[in-house]
Image (spheres, rainbow, N blue to C red):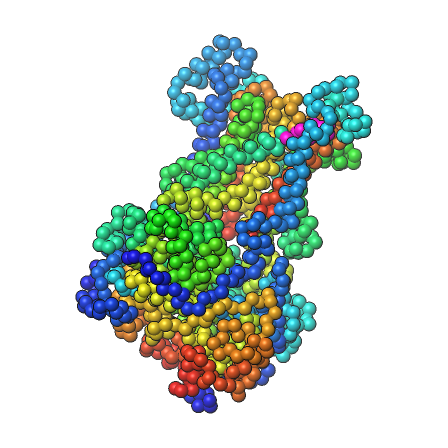
Amino acid sequence: MSTLVDGPLRQPRSTPVTGTPLLELHDVDVEIPLPHGRLHAVRGVSLTAYAGQALGLVGESGSGKSLTLRAAMDLLPSPAVITGGSVVVAGTDVTGMRPAQRREHISSAMAMIFQDALTALNPTMRIGDQVAEVPRQRLGMSRSAARARALDLLVQVGIRDPEQRYRAFPHELSGGMRQRVCIAIALSAEPGLILADEPTTALDVTIQKQVLDVLGRLRRDDGVGLVLVTHDLAVVSSTCSELDVMYGGRVVEEGLTEVLLSAPRHPYTAALLRSVPDPDAPVHRLLTIPGAPPDLLQPIEGCAFAPRCPAVVDRCRTERPPLASLGGPHASACWRAHEPERWPGAVGEAALEGVLR
Amino acid sequence: MSGTSPSTGSGSVSIGSGSVSTASGSVGEEVLAVEGLVQHFRGRGSAWGRLRGRPPKVVKAVDGVDLVLHRGETLGLVGESGCGKSTLSRCAAGLYTPTAGVVRYARQPLHGAPDRAQRRLVQMVFQDPYSSLNPRMTVGQTLSEILTYHRLVPRAQVRARVGELIDLVGLPTRAADQLPRSFSGGQRQRIGIARALALEPQVLIADEPVSALDVSVQATIINLLLDLKETLGLSMLFVSHNMAVVRQISDRIAVMHDGVVVEEGDTSEVFEHPHDDYTRLLLASVPRIGGAPAPATAGAATERGLR
Amino acid sequence: MRHLAYVGRRLVSTIPVLLGISVIVFFMIHLVPGDPARTLLGVRATDEAVAALHAKFGLDRPIWEQYLSFLGRLLHGDLGRSILYDTDVSSLLALRLPATLWLLVAATVMALLISIPLAVLAATHRDKLADQVVRAVPLVGLGMPTFWVGIMLVLLLALKVHAFPVSGFGKTPAQHLSSIILPGLTIALALTPILIRSLRTSMIGVLDSDYVVTARAKGLSHRRVITAHTLRNAAVSSITVLGVNIAYLVGSTLVVERVFALPGMGTMMLDAIFNRDFPVVQGVTLVFALMVVAVNLLTDLAHAALDPRIELA
Amino acid sequence: MTAPAVPVGPVEPLQPLQPSRLPWLRGRGGEGVLRLNPTLVIGLSLLVVIVLAGVLAPVLSPWDPVAQDLTASLQPPGNGHLLGTDQLGRDVFTRLLYAARVDLRVGALAVLFPFIIGTTLGLLAGWFGGWFDLVLMRVVDMVVAFPSFVLIIALVFALGQGTASIYIAITLVGWVAYARIVRGEVLVAKEQEYALAARASGLPTWRILLRHLLPNVLLQAFVFAMSDVVLSILAIVTLGYLGLGVPPPTPDWGSMISEGQNFVFTKWYLTAVPGLAVVVTGLALALVADGVVQRSGRR
């Protein structure tokens, strides 16, 4: 295994992980009370993000990835609530804080950007004023200083003619420009970490690349960390150095992106990887995952993926596998994580690919 | 006309008897073609606009496109949002009457909307699995309505044929009695495919059929389309913004940008040796697992230079 | 000035509507079975008078010629002569217009004063007790006949408490004001259920929007989030709601003036109806329609001023 | 192409048929069963009570609603007169019940005509567009320029007093709202992919309109009709109050309020109770409308 990690890394494997982590989730549960029961959307998720690091949070719809991010930012959509665990931001547990104080603390350490930049911007406020708002209102800058800061930020996210754009309204900008403005707003509070929820899903690939480049540059040059929630493994692969794969409200595998994507140790990761079409090489058939995701209204016994898992054994159905370390940062919540060579079919192949390469 | 485009290699007749190998470029006669197709839309709010005495804004969605789809092939139509690919596919499906140009089904030009027989030749699969099914009709009703109206099977056999169609797309027969809302996105997309197949078409036009689906579900639909194409001998116009998906499914691709086709050719040829600048940009922008930089591009180079 | 040009264009765009209004008002009389001249003059009119009117208005001419001459007279401010009072309809209207306008303004102001705070309260305390209570208001209130509310208000406030005059309009502005309060409140109460419902919905729409989430994510104070990011956007959607309902409000002045014996256009119209004074009915109908057109125009302009997405160019 | 004699069969393991992935969209009752919610139940029961009160009026009350007895005028409640008598000695409670008949029937019918006409015109205008749409919408602009109540009164006046005039006046004014709502819904629905798919299947236009569009656009019109019945009852009651409504001596809540107003200082209930009857009817219909909206999951 070690050869894998020592191989030439395409990403500088994040700035050396130093100091206290900016964001820690410990066993966080999120539930949504519904007329027919409580939807247990996030089930004991723990993760850690450092400044300067790019962490990917990947899963399909209903995996709980977005709610995890919202929970971290204390922006859960009503009626979802955190029902367990703790959120630690910049070394302080915010779970017990008063709402206003928590808001203050969280937003000074982290900022968030959303999938749909058009709806995330106030339609009746000039974009410059929206960028200048935090410097002016929260950082106590003078009007002119805040304006200068906003212009700076617009330049930093790659907006040309900032003076002119400053007075534009959101609807007058293109989709990519709007997302850049959102990033500028996120940066305006000088956060150590940006939480991004599918920030490029609504964008065309050419624009997506530009926006991801901006986020990448911010991380490299200014050490702004990134937690990127996405369904797109390819986006994570080109952006993030660490990766958490979520399924059924839990993290099922975590580790360095490269390791995870070349030698996955959870059958779900392996299957997901095999179902993604490769733009560079056509295959005759893509691997599919039979069955459907678990019903999160019900308690889940054993491993949530067991009903769909090609490598399932009896134990999987009764006993939930813990997220156990496989050495280093790599961990997998699978009873058979140690024997990928014995997984059947294409899932096994995917897991072994990296080892054999 | 695109048939004359040098890169298609459509001249070579190389159909081995019986064997239909995908991606090998086996090409038959023309089944669907558009020639000099132009579709302009007038801007909205025309009533107010007219009162204000302003000429309505014209959107040139498709601005002169020639394309030919041959029997047994899958033509991928790729491009980014607003490039006109969706409009083009709707023109080809006979849903829009083009501003100018000709649409031909089986070498016969359409005059206005397709007639009943022409409708049977070309069918369409839509993008949104949630809005593409009438929420108030069961799957069985949706399918039997078409079978009955087109008198495809004797009335007594409609029910049986509905069952066959549902089976064909890999759904259990009991699906016939359920409303669309009881299905997941992937299952709905199968129903949409069954609806298109009910008319036993020769050509399937699929407009972004997998872009609203999760990756693993997306794979099942792609596999289904590939299988159906082989078993039923369909020709397919596959419209997508997703380069990776198009690569899997198409024999030939056409790249659209700003209402025109900027490049057209065999899929592997275009992917490996793109000629047009826009195609290159598009390919370079596609994120890849493994993060391997795309075939050397200007963007990647400058980025490396910055480091 | 883009704004000025927009106002100009918007003014021009009301011309077809104004023409349409004149058509409807003109043809109203032709709905009546029988001879329009007799309708205009009333059943007691002499044959000579009828013949004279035929000659004067050219009722024997083709209908479109009649319409054109009607339109021509309209443009000169000539709305015909009242049969009952034997005066110009336009001068009668001028006498009655102020009371109705007072009433409209008072009702609008009161309706806003009642419904905005309640709607904001409900929207910011969604599904809490306050919200449940406020949401019950439209359910009960929608079915209240305006005139009945007026009578009940008289019963409760004016007669028991002797707080306000029960009828009439007074002579001085101060008297106008005090006599307008009860009728204004009546209309406001009729409008409130509709306003509360729409305002609450649009307010919730804004509070649920991503940009409010963004504002919260920025760490802005609750107050700042509401004032800078919520109110203007809620106003944008509410102003349209208000505009639509002011047309409804204009209509209800008619009955309320009757209840409170206010000498406005509504009472004049009803008097005219019972005396079959057709020119006055036509004239009042026309002015009411003009008021609606004016209100719609104002709403559109306010909307454009508030919302940058409205194309001014 | 011929249909394959043998279906190619499932191309991969079947996904189990699962209910909607979004559990809150799932109905509690079975498919196709009318699912009820508290709002709808309360509204419907209230409405049924009111309708029954009107229908069973002869059973519920021994008095004649129109027979005058001037010797017994303005009696206080009691003596077999639940709500006393009016100035002409008629039993008020009886008149209240019979008025429910009149006002509900006229109110509902006065909505039915505009509903049918407006929906049809809106459907056609939205689907076909073109000059028909243009002309129709200009007519709509003209009608909405009038305060609807002013126009109704003017029309009733022009047409002469009577129930028929009320129907015609309300129809001439009311169709506009339905035409607007349905046209708007059709403009959206016809670009929905299910409508495109129906066209792509080569189905005839009438079938697409009736089978695919109408059922999906009707809900909004129906919900509006629910509150429109309230508005139309209010209009009729108001006409009655002004003396332009259902001709006397037929009882109607509006004329009852008007008659009672003369004695509002001494016999307040003569005015208050008929008004309350209108309020309760309005509440019932508003609850039904809300319930239907909740049930359909639209807001």
Q: Is residue C7 left or right of residue C117?
A: left
Compare residues C306 and A94 and report the one nearer the observer. A94
Q: Splitting the image into 4 quarters, where does residue D273 fall?
A: top right
* Quadrant of the rendering where the C terminus of chain A is positioned: bottom left
Percent x, y for residue C154?
Answer: 73, 33
Magenta part of the chain: D92-101
* Vertical order, C207 against B269 (above or below): above
* Residue depicted at x 62% and y 60%: A36
The residue drawn where x is 27% and y is 63% is B72
Q: Is residue D288 left or right of residue D119?
A: right
Q: Is residue A164 visible?
A: no
Q: Is residue B228 above or below residue C17?
A: below
Magenta span main SS:
helix
Q: Is residue D127 left or right of residue D87?
A: left
Give coordinates of residue D113: x percent, y percent: 51, 33
Which one is in front, B228 or A261? B228
